[in-house]
Image (cartoon, coloured by chain):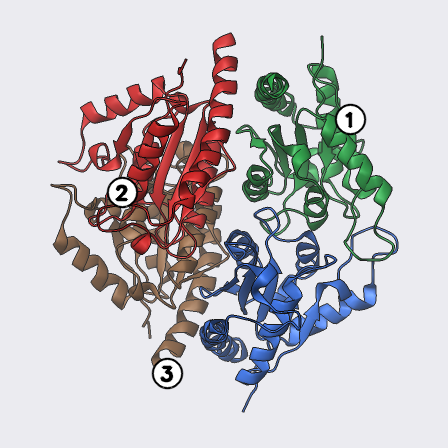
Chain colours: A green, B blue, C red, D brown
Amino acid sequence: MVRLFIPILLGTAREGRRTENAARFVFEQAKKDGRFKTRFLDVRDFVMIPKTDGAVSEEKSKEWKEIVTRADGLIIVSPEYNHGYPGELKLMLDQLYDEYNRKPAAICGTGAGMGGARMVEALRMSLVEFQMVPIRTAVYFSNIKTLFDENGKIKDESYGERLKKLFDELVWYAEALKVAREKK
Amino acid sequence: MVRLFIPILLGTAREGRRTENAARFVFEQAKKDGRFKTRFLDVRDFVMIPKTDGAVSEEKSKEWKEIVTRADGLIIVSPEYNHGYPGELKLMLDQLYDEYNRKPAAICGTGAGMGGARMVEALRMSLVEFQMVPIRTAVYFSNIKTLFDENGKIKDESYGERLKKLFDELVWYAEALKVAREKK
Amino acid sequence: MVRLFIPILLGTAREGRRTENAARFVFEQAKKDGRFKTRFLDVRDFVMIPKTDGAVSEEKSKEWKEIVTRADGLIIVSPEYNHGYPGELKLMLDQLYDEYNRKPAAICGTGAGMGGARMVEALRMSLVEFQMVPIRTAVYFSNIKTLFDENGKIKDESYGERLKKLFDELVWYAEALKVAREKK
Amino acid sequence: MVRLFIPILLGTAREGRRTENAARFVFEQAKKDGRFKTRFLDVRDFVMIPKTDGAVSEEKSKEWKEIVTRADGLIIVSPEYNHGYPGELKLMLDQLYDEYNRKPAAICGTGAGMGGARMVEALRMSLVEFQMVPIRTAVYFSNIKTLFDENGKIKDESYGERLKKLFDELVWYAEALKVAREKK
């Protein structure tokens, strides 16, 4: 019986973002895997700048809170911008705190040669502060500009196997921590 | 003859931000110091979310580019949010690249006990990628909630001396790199 | 019934190291707390440089492996050297891998004003790679040079309370992960 | 007239280290480039553990200090171990401080898919603290196990071009900072 819920968050709002292909691929693989329920979240639908008129949506902020409250973990799919994370992703994450506690988080990076490896490191620092468990397995989508064809289909099938390894670790932690959270 | 121009950027747009007091203090001390021309910049006046209607200002983006093009360095005054930098600050910085090259950058952090120390480390990673020189001296405004009185006056006068040390190092690099840039 | 075993590792081998006082304090508090069995480990007794004659001890390396195999978590007490961790600590940690997996780790830092905050961040990156869970609560022993009197007694009693919070989180994870590890 | 001196430091002492091939390659390319004098340094010849009998060499420590005092910059070639730097490299670097000030440093990483990218980030944090200038261009020797043939010859010739770009940036900074240091 599937009882875990782990949403997938696309972490860039940039026009022409290539990372959407990777996030959609992760979402499809997660559904195929079937060990947890999931949902596709786009930072574009939620992001807001504090005190900037026209960019704030209280309703969306509330929805984000409700989703994370119910979640047993989180998968973030994000590009690396200048060795860090996108600002819009940080704005989104910084809205909550308690809702993240004692839940695991996995990161999939996208980039050129490094597949977002520096963003992964930088983001993990904040995940620890959120009292999340940043799992070790990350998937690095390198050469993101050419990795998907014009229909958004991935050209390198080995990424399915890499994601399976990520799901293995994530589900192990999601289950272990859910059991422990519910005991209290 | 003063020929250096080093603007000061307040890196948070949050309502009720305490860091504005610190940024204003840095600005006042820089003017008093007199070794470089400066200007106060507020991320609120510039920040934008890519592809979010109502939050983009092309004009402001152009102004930011013109300022950095003329600048010989940069001082960033920013709080630490969850061991990282504010999203709006990253959005602002990620707009440019070439304009930063071969110029020094100093960071002043604000926070509780640590004065933003983790934000300083995380931000330096991006400064190196921007081909800037992240100088070693940082000023950490600890206990930011109580460091300034209700008129925005700093209660601990030692910060003036700490900033002088930061200006010393920053001016040394700004001068050295300007000479070298102009040689080419 | 106490069934958890979490050793405490002093991470510096430097002559005149002040951090030993902090590590001894953590050890005493852990024994008083009583929720887990512990043991004091000194990096000096274990550290080795690969291929440097006279510094390698195969026996000690084996002992370290046996300790971590039995352990349900790890507490590292270490100073910050130049915004990083001591080399001898990294040499010690890099000897093992599988033995760390799926166990939580807590870090206590020592330093001047920042109490080792940058070392904590840098070390967490490696802990994640070791498939450990770096817990959020850290204890930062600031002003380490004057924090203990000549008898090694701590002058600021609030550190006992801070450690209790660290033990709370560490024991929660140690228990949760032990249960999950034993299920498989 | 060549007046710059920039030594190259091999940062691992491990038996069977593959990184020696990369460091030798960097050394050969630097000599061929000819814009700066160089010298090959092996951490094995210098490294020491504080207070570990049989591992300390005061003479070698003095030699390291003399080399860095004369140097106008530094190139570090190092593998990544568990998302960090080798302990022996950190032990070596932590011996000095003033001698590094206001000099540029470049890092070449080695590793599997990422070519040491996380080590580069972690090490830069300490370079900034040493008051060095961590330059942006790094060379990442990926797939280090198969990149060199049995004679230590590199199989991918593009690395020569990548190193040239690194030397360009390093020499620019070494020259600019030397001029500024000598002015005072």
Is the residue at mark 2 from the same chain as the one at mark 1? no
Q: Residue, x 38% and y 49% (percent of image)? A: C156
Residue for badge 3: D183
To which quarter of the image does residue D75 belong? Answer: bottom left
Q: Is residue D93 above or below residue C184?
A: below
Question: Which numbered mark, 2 or 3, is in the foreground of this view?
Answer: 2
Seen from the viewer's position, the closer of residues D152 and C96 is C96
Question: Would you say residue A18 is visible in this rendering?
Answer: yes
**Front residue of B184 and D76:** D76
Calculate the distance from the C-alpha at mark 2 to the C-alpha at mark 1: 49 Å
The residue to which callout 2 is attached is C20
Cα separation between marks 2 and 3: 44 Å
Amino acid at dot 3 = Lys
The residue that mark 1 highlights is A39
State the image quarter where residue C49 is shown. top left
Q: Is residue D184 left or right of residue B18?
A: left
* Distance in Å between CA atoms under marks 1 and 3: 62 Å
Numbered disc in front, either 1 or 3: 1
Q: Label 3 is found on which chain of the structure?
A: D
Quarter in which the N terminus of chain D is drawn = bottom left
Q: Secondary structure at mark 2?
A: helix
